[in-house]
Amino acid sequence: MSDWIVPDFSAHWAVDIAKEYGVSLVYFSAFSAASSAFFGPMENLTGANRNYALPSPQSLTTPPEWISFPSMVAFKEYEAIYVPRGFFGANSTGISGASRLAKIISASKALAIRTCNEIEGDYLELYKKITGKPVIPTSVLPPEEPGKRVEREMSSDGFMFDWLDKQNPRSVLFLGFGSECKLSKEQVHEIAYGLELSELPFLWALRKPNSANNAYEVDDFLPLGFVDRTSEKGLVCFGWVPQMEILGHPSWRRSGLAVEVKHNEVGSLSRDEIAKTLRRAMVEEEGEQLRTNARKAAVVFGDHKLHQDHYIGAFVDYLKNNGAKR
């Protein structure tokens, strides 16, 4: 029999299983402590503090009253309109995301969050206060450093590193939106034009559009002539790329921790704002503090001893010493 069940917020049914078998629960959140604190105490998740009505979108655009220190954690208006029904409203399963989370937290002996005190100490303390539970930072769980790169003549991605080797140190912008983000053709075009206007060297890992059946349709996903016009400055790679090895290359520039491109009132991006924000983050004097912050954060994120020995070690010790007594 297991000593612990470690669910995320969606597996609310784990609560009943844990009760049936007398197994302890510890909730694990892959989200930041700031976002966890934003949604607040149990009565806010269940709606008890609103007579069980959905929150208004406007109420989500400013930090809530229980965040007592200066904070910018809130939704933009174009984001907030989706949250009341998307998170607090019941979905096709009959239970809302907020109710799932409330059920898991209520039944958990402790709450583990993928973060660290060096980055989110204030929010971790606040979350402990508003939930009344032990809150354990598990570290940011950085991946292992990439091993030695495969010899280029045997590697299908060798051309990327040949290109990176020709760039100046700390000069290249890397763009990657992950496997879950599906950009529309219009969004891709606006980002492409923004990159072109920025005149910055870039490597863009772009997911192949689902609708593309051949090379022509893939090329058509980008603005006409974009690849040729930017061939001396940038490289576009469709599909999977070895991201860890790319980010370990000396040509990559670590930019600010949080540089948000200004959106319009409906949440769309413009090429001019993309170009302006990229240049601010990468090269302009105005962004030097952002780059300084990034270098400081990189020391924390890259400290594997801190994350493995201190944070993971403390989490393991808690699990060893606080499981269900049989």
Image: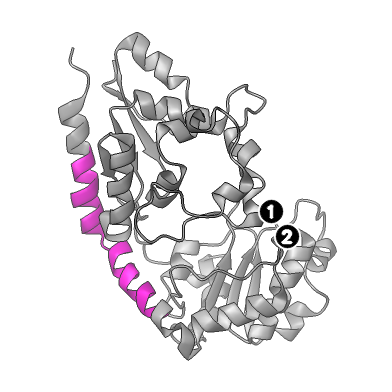
Q: Which residue is mark 1?
A: 182
Residue plotted at (83% across, 76% down): 224
Identify the magenta region: 291-315
Q: Position of residue 312 (x, y in %)?
A: 24, 45
Q: Which residue is mark 2?
A: 266
Q: Position of residue 216 (x, y in %)?
A: 84, 65
Residue type of the residue flagged with mark 1: Lys
Q: Is residue 143 above or below residue 256?
A: above
Q: Name the foreground residue: 133 vs 29.
A: 133
Q: Name the foreground residue: 286 vs 208.
A: 286
Magenta-colored stretch includes residue 68: no
Q: Report the number of numbered marks.
A: 2
Residue type of the residue flagged with mark 2: Val
Label disc, if present, on residue 31 of the rendered structure: none
State the SS at label 2. loop
- Asked whether, in this view, residue 249 is left or right of residue 75, the answer is left
State the SS at label 1. loop
- Asked whether, in this view, residue 170 is left or right of residue 109, the answer is right
Kindly indicate the quadrant of the structure image that contains residue 17. Answer: top left
Q: Position of residue 136 (x, y in %)?
A: 27, 42
Label 1: how many Cα within 10 Å (few below 14, some 14–19, many 20+):
some
